[in-house]
Image: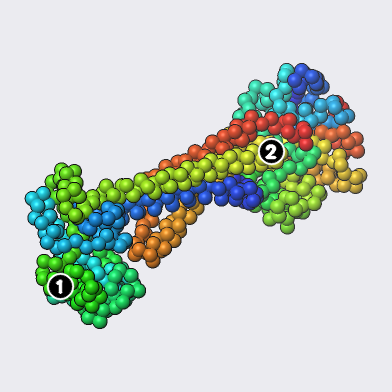
């Protein structure tokens, strides 16, 4: 038996009032930590996919949509642009490197992207099994895709038109899996990648069937009429990021969007919600501090005879005050730990939800710096809320309490 | 072993007590008897070092209590004095055994054999793992005696241990207290208004 054990016994002796304070703290800490985790994980994930892309050029429309579709592969593309126009831009002296990508099809909900081979290098993709594509209709498959759909080397994938599973399937759109990519923790994990030529080939025939009344169809077989969905651009000098996108937006009928700018705009939009929610969570933590204080204050009154007894047994004032502070700290620290567990389950839950809808994986359970602050805050709440009860116990007049009995 | 001289105490200048001198030798037990309101509890708290007198001297085991700090008194109490209260008090979150272990911990001791032998001696060993609020009144009183003697005090102070008991139980309890004091080598001072106890003590003073 010691003072620490006694504190714990005291907590368990009052399960109801202890667990109310605890639950409030777990909720407060849990919400804040969950927000911190999600914020960091999403930001990391987004930044990770942003590496090496200074600007994206695509069809006119919402710049955010252009970024989400062609960098993160989670929204529909704004439309297509002509290959010739894209070439003009990529030949500009300000452009360091450019990667053309084009969409068209999906296989069971996973997008099939026609892209230059540089695209895989951009995300540091490494082939785990098999080889790179050499011919049209040969594809490389990202790790999430083959894990989820149990695709093996040499399998044939029959694609569906559009980006959703429900699109009609092309009979001629049969792709052959020639390589599997290692997990890279970037967007290529959830893509099926092939040469641009494959996508052009399919859609040439396809467009022929589908849109016979459209004007362009007479020129279809000319090479110049080939289209791409977007082009990812890296500048020679970071300075170009200021003027070049504006030039494109003003002087051509293409759209240029800067991913880092769009993403920070996006974060500002939902950052407001996060901020409000975290203020609410801090409020809950403060309320838990009050509940802890009331809890300790009441139990101190109820336990004044046993405190007096412990003093007559020879315990010092200091030991008794320590016991009160211990009781509070045990509650707040376990509240902190349970709060972190709560947030980790929350992250797992959210990421399993997100993985289903947008094929993103957010699992990472490291402790963030801000969470150490949260630990500090919990300890502070524990000490502050037990301070007045502890001082009262320190000043307690045992003789008077015992004489009143 | 106990020598008091002209001890005076007043509560907030309202109640004033002047106690007669006490001189007690080693190996003697003492009964202090007095009507309500003569300051019995006050005297007991003074002897236990829970209160400090305004003037006079209390010499217990050759130590002058009035000259000790509050911290020294705590330490003196845990090494020398066991207290049996009029109404038993316990730490409610702990079992009987844990209460005794806590008392030992406070006195920097750890001796489960002694706890066992005390509980057996008081016939409450089978209640060791019961919470104290599950005990009967009689059992509670025994546990409170156990708490008073667990740290082998040289002096046991008992405040009205028999006031609410019938004649039969009164005599049982006082015999038990005396036996425990003898068994564990402690002196006993009982403070009470209960005149039935007179016949059990050779030495008594009246306040």
Q: How many labels does the image show?
A: 2
Give the alpha-carbon distance from disc 2 to disc 1, as whole Å. Answer: 92 Å
Q: Mark 2 lies on which chain?
A: A
Q: How crowded is mark 1: few (under 14 residues within 10 Å), some or many (20 or more)?
A: few
Residue at coordinates 87% horizontally, 30% vertically from top-left?
B36
Kindly give the residue lying farthest to the bottom in the view shown.
A171
Q: Mark 1 lies on which chain?
A: A
Q: In the rendered view, would you say B134 is above or below A324?
A: below
Residue at coordinates 20% horizontally, 76% vertically from top-left?
A208
Q: Residues within 10 Å of mark 2 (few under 14, many from 20)?
A: some
Residue at coordinates 73% horizontally, 17% vertically from top-left?
B55
User: Could you tell me which secondary element the residue under label 2 belongs to?
Assistant: helix
Across and down, in percent, residue A60 comes to 24, 56
A18 displayed left or right of B163: left
Across and down, in percent, residue B16 comes to 80, 19
Residue at coordinates 88% horizontally, 36% vertically from top-left?
B194
Across and down, in percent, residue B164 comes to 86, 42
Q: Quadrant of the C terminus of chain A?
A: top right
Q: Nearer the viewer, residue A81 or B105?
A: A81
User: Could you tell me which secondary element the residue under label 1 belongs to?
Assistant: helix
Q: Name the residue under label 2.
A: A301
A109 displayed left or right of A326: left
Q: Are marks 2 and 1 in contact (CB under 8 Å)?
A: no
Q: Name the residue under label 1.
A: A218
Across and down, in percent, residue B192 comes to 84, 34
């Amino acid at each position: 038996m010691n003072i620490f054990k006694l504190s714990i016994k005291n907590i368990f002796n009052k399960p109801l009032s202890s667990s109310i304070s605890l639950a409030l703290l777990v909720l407060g800490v849990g919400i804040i930590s969950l927000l911190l985790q999600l914020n960091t994980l999403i930001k990391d994930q987004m930044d990770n996919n942003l590496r090496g892309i200074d600007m994206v050029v695509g069809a006119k429309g919402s710049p955010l949509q252009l970024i989400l579709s062609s960098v993160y592969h989670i929204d529909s593309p704004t439309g297509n642009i002509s290959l010739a126009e894209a070439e003009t831009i990529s030949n500009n002296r300000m452009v360091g490197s450019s990667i053309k990508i084009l969409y068209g099809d999906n296989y069971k909900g996973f997008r099939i992207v026609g892209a230059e081979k540089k695209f895989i290098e951009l995300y540091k993709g490494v082939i785990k099994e098999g080889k790179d594509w050499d011919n049209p209709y040969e594809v490389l498959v990202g790790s999430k895709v083959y894990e989820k759909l149990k695709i093996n080397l040499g399998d044939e994938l029959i694609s569906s038109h559009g980006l959703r599973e429900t699109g009609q399937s092309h009979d001629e759109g049969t792709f052959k899996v020639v390589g599997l990519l290692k997990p890279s923790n970037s967007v290529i994990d959830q893509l099926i990648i092939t040469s641009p030529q494959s996508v052009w080939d399919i859609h040439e025939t396809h467009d022929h069937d589908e849109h016979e009344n459209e004007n362009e169809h007479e020129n279809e077989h000319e090479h110049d009429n080939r289209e791409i969905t977007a082009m990812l651009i890296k500048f020679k000098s970071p300075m170009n990021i200021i003027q070049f996108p504006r030039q494109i937006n003003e002087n051509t009928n293409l759209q240029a969007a800067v991913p880092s700018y769009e993403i920070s705009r996006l974060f500002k939009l939902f950052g407001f919600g996060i901020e409000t929610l975290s203020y609410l969570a801090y409020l809950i933590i403060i309320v838990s501090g009050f509940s802890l204080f009331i809890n300790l204050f009441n139990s101190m009154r109820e336990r004044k005879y046993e405190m007096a007894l412990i003093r007559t047994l020879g315990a010092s004032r200091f030991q008794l005050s320590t016991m009160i502070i211990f009781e509070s700290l045990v509650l707040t620290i376990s509240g902190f730990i349970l709060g972190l567990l709560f947030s980790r389950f929350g992250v797992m839950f959210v990421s399993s939800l997100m993985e289903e809808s947008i094929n993103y994986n957010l699992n990472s359970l490291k402790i963030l710096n801000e969470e150490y602050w949260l630990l500090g805050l919990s300890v502070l709440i524990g000490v502050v809320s037990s301070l007045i009860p502890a001082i009262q116990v320190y000043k307690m007049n045992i003789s008077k309490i015992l004489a009143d009995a | 072993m106990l020598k008091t001289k002209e001890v005076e105490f007043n509560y907030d200048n309202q109640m004033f007590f002047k106690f007669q001198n006490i001189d007690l030798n080693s190996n003697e037990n003492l009964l202090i008897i007095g009507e309500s309101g003569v300051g019995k509890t006050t005297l007991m708290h003074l002897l236990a070092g829970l209160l400090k007198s305004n003037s006079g001297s209390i010499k217990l085991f050759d130590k002058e209590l009035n000259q000790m700090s509050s911290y020294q008194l705590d330490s003196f109490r845990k090494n020398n004095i066991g207290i049996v209260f009029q109404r038993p008090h316990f730490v409610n979150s702990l079992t009987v055994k844990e209460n005794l272990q806590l008392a030992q911990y406070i006195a920097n001791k750890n001796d489960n054999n002694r706890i066992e032998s005390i509980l057996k001696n008081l016939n409450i060993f089978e209640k060791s793992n019961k919470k104290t609020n599950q005990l009967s009144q009689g059992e509670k009183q025994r546990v409170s005696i156990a708490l008073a003697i667990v740290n082998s005090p040289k002096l046991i102070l008992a405040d009205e241990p028999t006031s609410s008991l019938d004649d039969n139980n009164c005599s049982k309890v006082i015999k038990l207290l005396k036996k425990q004091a003898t068994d564990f080598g402690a002196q006993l001072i009982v403070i009470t208004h209960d005149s039935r106890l007179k016949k059990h003590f050779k030495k008594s003073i009246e306040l």
